[in-house]
Image (spheres, grey):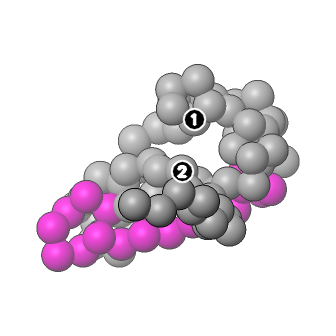
Amino acid sequence: MSDWTLGAVKARNMEINALCEKEGCRHLFTFNLDALIEGVGPDYPLADIPPMECPACGEGQLVIRLSFVDPAPEPEHE
Ligand SMILES: [Zn+2]
């Protein structure tokens, strides 16, 4: 994921989430990707997003994750 840029995330119809790693909080929020791109540009690498403190509990560190906006159906069955 270190090579991902904001533009690449958007092009794949994915979104950027931040999850609090503190046990018992697990606050999750979704970045406004369009606003981010407007602010820093589509070439901004995800790896450059600075470490952030959780706004909900104020203690946990937020972990950046990517997820699909619309989960792709899984064609394979076991
Ligand atoms: Zn938290």
Position of the C terminus, as image quadrant, is bottom left
Q: In the displayed structure, does residue 75 sit left or right of residue 55?
A: right
- Quarter of the view holding residue 21: bottom left
Q: Position of residue 70 (x, y in %)?
A: 68, 68
What residue is at 51 percent from the left and 26 percent from the top? 2
Residue type for callout 1: Leu
What residue is at 67 percent from the left and 54 percent from the top? 14
Q: Position of residue 8 (x, y in %)?
A: 74, 37
What residue is at 62 percent from the left and 31 percent from the top? 4
Name the secondary structure under disc 2: strand
Q: Closer to the camera, 35 or 6?
A: 6
Q: What range is drawn magenta here?
A: 20-37
Q: Is residue 17 found inside the magenta-colored segment of the image?
A: no
Residue type for callout 2: Leu
Q: Which mark is residue 66?
A: 2
Height in image: 38 above or below 77?
above
The answer to which of marks 1 and 2 sits earlier in the sequence is 1
- Quarter of the view holding residue 35: bottom right
Judge whether residue 1 can be spotted in this image: yes
Q: Which mark is residue 46?
A: 1
Q: Closer to the camera, 73 or 43?
A: 73
Q: Are marks 1 and 2 in contact (CB under 8 Å)?
A: yes
